[in-house]
Amino acid sequence: MTYYKIMVNRQRKWMLYLLAISVAGWGFTDYETIFAGLILGQAIGFFNLYLMQKKIDVVGGKAANNQTAKSFGTVSRFAGAALLVVVVLRFPEHFHLIAAIVGLMTPYIVIMIDFIIHHKETTTTKRGE
């Protein structure tokens, strides 16, 4: 398995853990609207992460074969964010707007934290060689 696939699986796993924590918070606390917003944002963010990872895999494969590739699917990720805002504004009694936006940004935070942790691992491994 390539390092990229290992990294993708690790990031998806962390997203599912965070989504499970949000579902538990929704079920066991009195902050249903906040956690419902987080769940909705994280679900759309997870889908956006999936789309981005698939596009990166396709672009990387085409680059390895010296072919040109299209875009990274920015329009579909923007459409997901727009859908999130429309649903939250349509049902403000069920979803918290700020929590939904934080949930939508969660995959990017996961990517950054994963990079920092892995960068530390690779620098310590290279020094030990």
Image: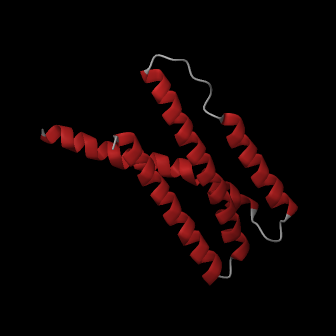
Q: Position of residue 26 (x, y in %)?
A: 64, 76
Q: Residue at x 67, y 58 (%)?
A: 41
User: Residue 79, located in which quarter of the rendered image?
Assistant: top right
Most distant residue in the right direction: 90
Classify the position of the N terminus by image quarter.
top left
User: Residue 64, located in which quarter of the rendered image?
Assistant: top left
Q: Position of residue 91 (x, y in %)?
A: 84, 65
Left or right: 15, with 70 as reference point: left
Seen in the picture, residue 94 relative to 10 is either above or below; the reply is below
Q: Position of residue 24 (x, y in %)?
A: 57, 77
Seen in the picture, residue 63 relative to 106 is either above or below; the reply is above
Q: Count the numbered circles shown.
A: 0
Q: Residue at x 68, y 54 (%)?
A: 101
Seen in the picture, residue 109 relative to 68 is either above or below; the reply is below
Left or right: 46, with 62 as reference point: right
Classify the position of the C terminus by image quarter.
top left
In the image, 19 versus 119, the foreground residue is: 19
User: Residue 35, located in which quarter of the rendered image?
Assistant: bottom right
- Asked which colour scheme the image uses, the reply is secondary structure
Seen in the picture, residue 18 relative to 28 is either above or below; the reply is above
Q: Position of residue 105 (x, y in %)?
A: 61, 51
Q: Residue at x 45, y 47 (%)?
A: 8
Q: Residue at x 68, y 82 (%)?
A: 30
